[in-house]
Image (tube, rainbow, N blue to C red):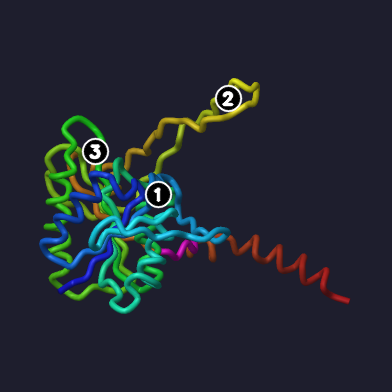
Amino acid sequence: MTRILVTNDDGIFSEGIKLLAEELGKIADVTVVAPDREQSASGHSLTLHRPLRLRKIREHWYSVDGTPTDCVNLAVLGLLKEEKPDLVVSGINFGLNLGDDVTYSGTVSAAFEGSLFNIPSVAFSLEVAEGFSFARAAEFARSFMDTVLAEPLPSDLILNVNLPAGDIQGVHFTRLGHRVYDQSLVEKVDPRGRKYYWIAGEPVWTPEEGTDHAAVSTGFASVTPLHLDLTDYRGLDAYGGLHQRLSDKLEGKAAP
């Protein structure tokens, strides 16, 4: 039977991971390894400067005092090293992970980490708005994964799945959208007279057809294939003039 490692960034006791694990348990052997507290926007961070602790919550459920990336590492290299998972599934996140925000997302980063271990990985996120339901999202996730598992998967598969709050009209394969935050920095003073700051802002999305944001905003589930190669291949040609200027200058300095 398929072995699935389930994790998230909302923490081991979140409703999203509970219902996701229950639904996936109907089609696979599921082990849950998740942070012991919320780790939203932790990105692809890895804990290197302190020890990590793994605690058994109940059978096949474990918490880690670290990030989602830590959880995948401890599971694959430690807890499940004798029977490596066939799939990593992250979520269901409380809130969407669209467009540029995938670089901040702990949910998506757990899927990135699974891919680094050559394990196909999927991240699920749910829009938080009127009518949203983790139960409905978890049922969709089970059906989605059942379909995905019908054929052998490439080891570098990373799918970022975002679900609308209401009824799902269908599924669109999409590219990442683009947003700009109307960013602000709020400065306050604590009771001891020390300054502290809140980073705040509202996203302003670029309206583009074919993006994950466009799909979800019209009631469709978006499925975006991702990969970890961040190379701008267009730039290798487009920045040829800069390459030449740098080469000429540095080679000139190196010349006797």
In the foreground, 19 or 127:
19
Question: Which labelled disc corresponds to residue 105?
Answer: 1
Query: Could you tell which of marks 2 and 1 lies nearer the N-terminus?
Result: 1
- Quadrant containing the C terminus is bottom right
In this view, the mark in front (2 or 3): 2
Label 3: which residue? 217
> Which residue extends farthest right?
256
The answer to whether one can see residue 224 in this image is no
* Kind of element beneath mark 2: strand
Label 2: which residue? 187
Q: Residues at badges 3 and 1 in contact (C-beta under 8 Å)?
A: no
- Magenta includes 183? no
Type of the residue with mark 2: Glu
Residue at the spot x=39%, y=33% of the render?
A: 204
Q: Point out the stretch of residues depicted in magenta.
A: 228-232
Q: Main secondary structure of the magenta part?
A: loop
Based on the displayed image, in which of its 4 quarters is residue 94 positioned? top left
Q: Is residue 241 left or right of residue 78?
A: right
Does residue 250 lie above or below 188 as drawn? below
Question: Which labelled disc corresponds to residue 205?
Answer: none
- Quadrant containing the N terminus is bottom left
Type of the residue with mark 1: Ser
Residue at the spot x=25%, y=50% of the render?
A: 17
- Residue 19, how many percent across, how many down? 18, 49
- Residue 118, how many percent across, how many down? 35, 74
The answer to whether one can see residue 214 in this image is yes
Q: Residues at badges 2 and 1 in contact (C-beta under 8 Å)?
A: no
Cα separation, mark 3 vs mark 1, equals 20 Å
Query: Could you tell which of marks 2 and 3 lies nearer the N-terminus?
Result: 2
- Residue 211, how many percent across, how many down? 30, 47
- Residue 4, how many percent across, how many down? 23, 66
